Image (cartoon, rainbow, N blue to C red):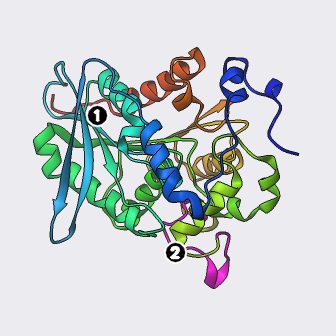
């Protein structure tokens, strides 16, 4: 079967798509692929935004690295909104600077701090390391970080791309069960939500662009420390695979409103649609942005194309609406 034909891809993306080399992440080459991804898989801050790295949390509980993006202009008067972000990379590669452009655009367009988390990666750090780091960063941002950055803890959103989107979804679930409140919103960009996709080996032959199912199997296996797709006693632990929550009665009730964006030629198309439907069924507001002819990572590979700009604007408008002050709140 092989990769989709170029004429199936959105016309704005065809040149980029045609130039993509075959890419599969496998354990024996992972160290080298991480090096190459670190060298070439990074972007730059947009003008008007400054970024700095720091550690948050405590040495006793374990510090977590974050990259903080701040617009150079005035922030909202009084405590304002913020976004906690998680980069992509299949839970096995990546770092905050991969999303330098995206995070700095959010900071500029919404005049708010964006905090991108350098969570630990599998296989050296399997589940729950990344989620523990996500929770530590959240805890800091709604407490000490809120005071430091001028953030209203009740106006913090979470979001992420690919694996980072799945991590943001799992964080929202964990917060709900721990009675720790909820983020104001979730922005999930073609999120990696369901380990069971990796067990559908018939998908291997489709060779999806940028992140295919063989890479998906590598990522989930490393993160879970076990074969993905297990059931019963072999099913992943709670909060490891966000879509497993769909199987629980009322599992998605009470979660934050979500924006989910995915292309028709993305490996995660089916699982994103299923999760969006599950949120709707649970009474959770969910805006689903379908990109006909879009493939995984297209706005990262081609951020200046009109299609990518429209995709970004949809996220910004969702966040602007959801992060606005509550009616009657003090300015």
Residue found at the far right of this picture: 1
238 falls in the magenta region: yes
Q: Is residue 131 above or below residue 66?
A: below
Q: Which residue is mark 2?
A: 237
Tell me which numbered mark, 1 or 2, is placed earlier along the sequence.
2
The CA span between labels 1 and 2 is 36 Å
| Residue under the image location 28 percent in, 34 percent down | 326
Q: Nearer the viewer, residue 202 or 258?
A: 202
Question: Tag 2: Cα neighbours inside 10 Å, few (<14), some, or many (≥20)?
Answer: few
- The C terminus, quarter of image: top left
Question: Tag 1: Cα neighbours inside 10 Å, few (<14), some, or many (≥20)?
Answer: few
Residue 326 marker: 1
- Looking at the rendering, the stretch of residues picked out in magenta corresponds to 228-246
Q: Position of residue 90 (x, y in %)?
A: 54, 53
**Quick check: 192 left or right of 69?**
right
Q: Position of residue 32 (x, y in %)?
A: 51, 53
| Residue under the image location 68 percent in, 37 percent down | 21
Q: Position of residue 151 (x, y in %)?
A: 19, 39
Examine the image and state in which quarter residue 67 appears: top left
Q: Mark 1 vs mark 2: give the one in front.
A: 2
Element on which disc 1 rests: loop
| Residue under the image location 18 percent in, 60 percent down | 57
| Residue under the image location 47 percent in, 51 percent down | 34
Q: Nearer the viewer, residue 331 or 273?
A: 273
**Quick check: 203 left or right of 55?**
right
Instruction: Tell me, yes or no, whether the two marked residues, 1 and 2, touch with CB atoms within 8 Å.
Output: no
Examine the image and state in which quarter residue 19 appears: top right
- The N terminus, quarter of image: top right
Q: Is residue 91 among the parts visible in the rendering?
A: no
Q: Is residue 130 above or below residue 230?
A: above
273 falls in the magenta region: no
């Amino acid at each position: 079967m092989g990769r989709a034909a170029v004429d199936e891809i959105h016309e704005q993306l065809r040149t980029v798509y045609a130039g993509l080399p075959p890419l599969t992440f496998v354990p024996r080459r992972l160290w080298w692929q991480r090096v190459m991804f670190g060298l070439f898989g990074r972007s730059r801050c947009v003008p008007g935004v400054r970024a700095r790295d720091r550690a948050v949390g405590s040495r006793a509980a374990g510090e977590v690295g974050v990259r903080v993006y701040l617009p150079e202009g005035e922030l909202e008067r009084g405590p304002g909104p913020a976004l906690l972000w998680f980069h992509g990379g299949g839970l096995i590669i990546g770092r905050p600077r991969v999303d330098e452009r995206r995070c700095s655009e959010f900071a500029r367009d919404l005049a708010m701090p964006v905090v991108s988390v350098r969570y630990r990666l599998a296989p050296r750090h399997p589940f729950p390391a990344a989620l523990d780091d996500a929770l530590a960063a959240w805890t800091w941002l709604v407490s000490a970080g809120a005071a430091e950055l001028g953030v209203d803890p009740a106006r913090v959103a979470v979001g992420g791309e690919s694996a980072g989107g799945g991590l943001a979804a799992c964080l929202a679930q964990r917060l709900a069960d721990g009675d720790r409140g909820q983020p104001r919103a979730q922005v999930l960009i073609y999120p990696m939500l369901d380990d069971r996709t990796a067990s559908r080996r018939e998908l291997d032959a489709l060779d999806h662009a940028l992140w295919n199912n063989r890479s998906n199997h590598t990522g989930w296996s490393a993160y879970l420390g076990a074969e993905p797709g297990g059931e019963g006693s072999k099913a992943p632990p709670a909060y490891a695979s966000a879509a497993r929550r769909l199987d629980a009665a009322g599992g998605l009730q009470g979660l934050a409103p979500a924006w989910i964006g995915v292309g028709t030629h993305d490996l995660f198309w089916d699982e994103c649609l299923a999760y969006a439907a599950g949120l709707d069924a649970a009474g959770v507001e969910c805006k689903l942005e379908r990109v006909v002819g879009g493939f995984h990572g297209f706005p990262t590979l081609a951020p200046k194309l009109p299609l990518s700009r429209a995709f970004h604007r949809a996220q910004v408008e969702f966040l602007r609406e959801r992060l606005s002050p509550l009616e009657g709140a003090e300015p």
